[in-house]
Amino acid sequence: MGKDGTYGEIKNFALTTDLYQIIMAAAYYSSPYHRERKTIGIFEMFVRKLPKNRSFVVVAGVEQVIQYVLNLRYDDEQIAYLQSLEVFKDVNKEFFDYLRRFKFNGSLWSVPEGTVLFPNEPILRIEAPIIEAQILETCILSIMNFQSMIATKAARIVSAASHKPVVEFGSRRAHGPQAGVLAARGAFIGGCVGTSNLLAGKSFGIPVFGTMAHSFILSHDNELEALKEFNNMFPTGFLLVDTYDTMKAVTKLLRSGIRPFGIRLDSGDLYTLSTEIRKLLDSAGCKDTKIMVSGDLNEQSISKLLTSGAPIDCFGVGTELSTSRDDPTMNGIYKLVAVKVLNPDKDSGKYEIIYKSKTSVGKGTYPGPKQVCRFIEDNVLEKDYLILENEKAPDKSILLLKKYVEDGNKLLEMPSIFETQNYSSKQLELLPAALISLDVEPILFPVILSQKIKSLGHPHDPS
Amino acid sequence: MGKDGTYGEIKNFALTTDLYQIIMAAAYYSSPYHRERKTIGIFEMFVRKLPKNRSFVVVAGVEQVIQYVLNLRYDDEQIAYLQSLEVFKDVNKEFFDYLRRFKFNGSLWSVPEGTVLFPNEPILRIEAPIIEAQILETCILSIMNFQSMIATKAARIVSAASHKPVVEFGSRRAHGPQAGVLAARGAFIGGCVGTSNLLAGKSFGIPVFGTMAHSFILSHDNELEALKEFNNMFPTGFLLVDTYDTMKAVTKLLRSGIRPFGIRLDSGDLYTLSTEIRKLLDSAGCKDTKIMVSGDLNEQSISKLLTSGAPIDCFGVGTELSTSRDDPTMNGIYKLVAVKVLNPDKDSGKYEIIYKSKTSVGKGTYPGPKQVCRFIEDNVLEKDYLILENEKAPDKSILLLKKYVEDGNKLLEMPSIFETQNYSSKQLELLPAALISLDVEPILFPVILSQKIKSLGHPHDPS
């Protein structure tokens, strides 16, 4: 939503949030308790339980979150809408004046995009006046949950493809036009070589790929004429050969003297077809012609094709990737882990920190702002150790959370999408093989809590 | 994507599409075959196979599709991006000048939003110069597939809730911020009473609902004080009582003399808790206090709660609804069913129609522009009968596709979202009970092809 309706930059998402955030903002604003204490909230985003079949998550979406946080404003039209709601009829006008001046003045820590994380580890942390920190919840979750879920799915698919090129083709099945753009970004971070989505190309600099659809063939009288015409115009294009009869189409194509740059198969038994077509191509001297396959592929079907020796050079993956079809939900949550308050009985002007945790059955949380200390041995992730941010980190561990925003100002520049993909790929190389294997059940990676965190609270069943 | 970043209006999605649409557009533009014939393409959108467990689809998204189609333009920045791509390096500049002047001049037929449809039935049809019709594919699919899938999921959930109010709460788990807004719209059309999403409220006039989060309770020293403070400010709000110990919280609340408007439960055994809390409320004289439950609910868990007699007044449904978690994919497709061409050998200036169909294995299509004729007996859907649009409709049948856009101009005004919801609810009432029952496997509703359609082609395995 830049001015031209692009989704690459996320500039003003003031109302793409839940009503209760604004209700709570109004309640915090008028609360005698919080007014006296000038409460600062510290929230952490983390995942309690990963999507099915997953043993890790590839974090993505941080760049969009930072854009959102730094650009969040409320304009007159948005405020007029809020004021028109029955629920706000008795809320003091001062609160809406506050919204009109709203700007994020807090700080944001996050792991870098592309980092591999595990359940219960903080992905990002916000520390800000309680209203500012509260109001960000819905949008942060919707940005991070989706892109991270897709980056994770892509990592599994790319791994199953033994790092043969995988292109993201799923815009038409993504959950609306913007989801297509964001899915392309997540998929690239997770290891895809590119996307078919043009806005993702323009906004993020992701390489774009495209072939042709059956409609182009159908629109002509004659399949071969359509393929020839297309090939003349786009000699490095992939020709789609399965509109009528795949083997006949390839045979006619080769007999006509065309030496296609690439062939795309989108239906049928892809193992048999790719094998037969490879033979035809090779015997016609087209050893360099690439074979791309597509059509409801996922990590399992790709792995099966390659294990059986199908001579496939690259994959187009749509629906299953852009919807994370086997589990379309990452249940990331954003929880208050501490407040900082002025003691109303003292006039010291000093904030004191109070750790917070829910103890709801099955939904408990660990209190306190945390840091992830990672141990790597012989190029393999060994374990993570969670400490409170003010605890001393153990020797030889790498600290994952970095401060990106301080007092409303950006501290760190974001890496390019290529740097992020490269970092993510290195993170994935460190992963113990079983964690990305399709053949084993999800594995719980060792995430160890410091004694101090444990001593602060005992949530029921933090699973 | 209005100027202020709203997603309610969809104005310019020129690049939220697949690269191959523009590649094909360039190929059509330069094609001697199509230049001579001035080819008009007729495309239909339909679903081959419904998402798992579904026997029908509630169509939604037509209003956004029409906005998209009528407002699609290419600006200089977008065209400059396209021209920068390697694949277009040899494409004539004339084509990009064409894009700069691009405007949809064709016609669009659709079933009204809220219509209940079945596999292989046309949802909408575009007839336009082939480039115009082609270029719309990706975005039409991404808009219609998602909203229709959510409307369908909502219809199942609302039916399971025996029409007790269901509010859509899923923005944080939807696939990005825009998906949250569009999910809210689909859910409302499918029968939800409202959403938590403010932009959906502002853009579409959907009623918005909100309660409070655990963070509000946690931010205070004392749970009861937090609840009191909130209740003072929002006396018709729902109080969230499961931050620590649900029964204790309600007991304290009632002892303090508060008579809550509503109570919200978000964790634990919802049957036991709602039953116990109802008793507490009734014995404290709070017979009017409503109980709302939330927390990973879906049609099965809601049905189970109500069947077992849980005294629940309303439901908040998030993740499972806004991601259609049991199957997050509607495989709607957009296929060329006919072209109209000028015969280059005659100079009659008259178009002739040529029917088109794919015969790919497992992915065949039925040719020709079609109409759905519906038969209703005693207020129950009896069968649908598909004819070619120029065939005579059988007596007593209702024709479902209407012409919304003619030669680039809007013909029909869209109904309000309330009218659409009402129409959808009446459509769902006509559905044979087994088709919406959770207890039976998906059922194939009788959709009968006219002899003429059958005679035109025999796609392999149109399943």
Image (cartoon, coloured by chain):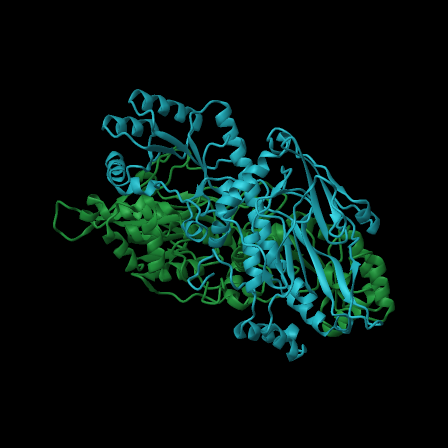
Chain colours: A cyan, B green
Q: Inspect this view and state whether residue B368 appears.
A: no
Residue found at x 68% / y 49%:
A122
Residue A211 in the figure: left or right of residue B10: left
Residue B429 in the figure: left or right of residue A358: left
Count of labels in the image:
0
> Between A67 and B50, which is closer to the camera in this rendering?
A67
Which quadrant is home to the C terminus of chain B? top left
- Residue B182, x across and y down, in percent: 52, 58
Q: Inspect this view and state whether residue B341 appears.
A: yes
> Between B55 and B385, which is closer to the camera in this rendering?
B55
> Between B276 and B232, which is closer to the camera in this rendering?
B232
Residue A60 in the figure: left or right of residue B227: left
- Residue B291, x across and y down, in percent: 74, 61
- Residue B104, x across and y down, in percent: 31, 59
- Residue A389, x across and y down, in percent: 73, 51
Residue B375 in the figure: left or right of residue A438: left
* Vertical comparison of A450 with B313: above or below: above
Residue found at x 26% / y 56%:
B98
* Residue farthest front in this picture: A395
